[in-house]
Amino acid sequence: MSPALLITDLVLAYGGVTAVKGISLDVPAGRTVCLIGANGAGKTSVMRAISGLVKAKTGSISYFGEELTGSHPAGMAARGIAHVPEGRETFQRLTVEESLRMGGFRLSGVEFARRRDAMYDTFPRLRERRTQVSGLLSGGEQQMLAMARALISSPKLLLLDEPSMGLAPNIVDEVFKVIADLRKTDTTVLLVEQNALRALELADYAYVMETGSIVMEGEGRQLANDPRITTAYLGGEGDYL
């Protein structure tokens, strides 16, 4: 299967510090791929580079064969790329409905209404909060809104950075159900997630990052049962990576 996203020999640096050290990975179209690793491994830097928020020092990022390296973030939505960043970053002074409209700014009024209602069906709590400003939502509700704002554009590629961070277990279950349901829509997903077990059980394929490098890769469920992963990230017994 051809990759929707192909990263080759990517190097990212902040000043004199190299955060990502020549990694390569691919995300097949319509599949869910996760990137796991300890804090500071470079996962978020990779996501930000795909979105154009961080410029590559060297290497290549291509999207369905189109070179993205050096592209401006403003052009990503038109290409069908949506990014839900770590920390959610909702528009604090906009209502839920206004925030969704920002995500669907390229849609006609009729199409926006259709997709907005679909988002409310996916996240019923947002329908209840539709006139409330985003800054007054709970953390879980803000995460739902961030995901709905990204999904309303029906992206071809969805970048999800730590979607379960800081959420109550019942909200985590809801978030992961939405991610799993994206398989039915053929949406390509690259997921960075602190909950390694949940991510690996969900993902078709996974990469493990450590201090800026990819140290392991394989099918998600296969890695979930690997004793090295169990020790390093899941609290089990085995040899460290």
Image (spheres, rainbow, N blue to C red):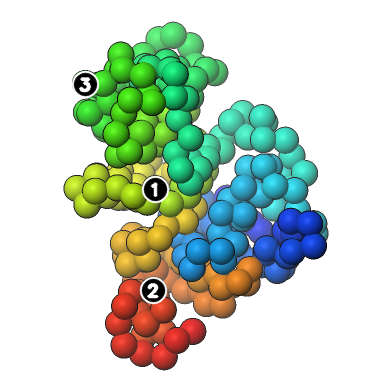
Q: Are marks 1 and 2 in contact (CB under 8 Å)?
A: no
Whole-angstrom CA distance, mark 1 to mark 2, is: 17 Å
Q: Residues within 10 Å of mark 2 (few under 14, many from 20)?
A: some
Q: Secondary structure at mark 2?
A: helix
Q: Which residue is mark 2?
A: 233
Q: Which residue is mark 1?
A: 163
Whole-angstrom CA distance, mark 3 to mark 1, is: 21 Å
Q: Is residue 118 above or below residue 5?
A: above
Q: Are marks 2 and 3 in contact (CB under 8 Å)?
A: no
Instruction: Look at label 1 and name its amino acid.
Output: Pro
Is any atom of residue 118 visible in this view?
no
Residue 80, percent from left and from top? 56, 35
Q: Secondary structure at mark 3?
A: helix
Q: Residue furthest top?
A: 109
Q: Is residue 21 above or below residue 1?
A: below
Left or right, 163 with respect to 128, comes to: right
Indicate which disc, 3 or 1, sits on the residue closer to the N terminus: 3
Instruction: Look at label 3 and name its amino acid.
Output: Glu
Q: Which mark is residue 128?
A: 3
For the point 69% across and 53% down, the residue is: 61
Left or right, 28 with respect to 143, comes to: right
For the point 59% across and 31% down, the residue is: 77
Which quarter of the picture shows residue 100? top left
Q: Residues within 10 Å of mark 1 (few under 14, many from 20)?
A: many
Q: Is residue 109 above or below residue 52?
A: above
For the point 42% across and 57% down, the residue is: 193
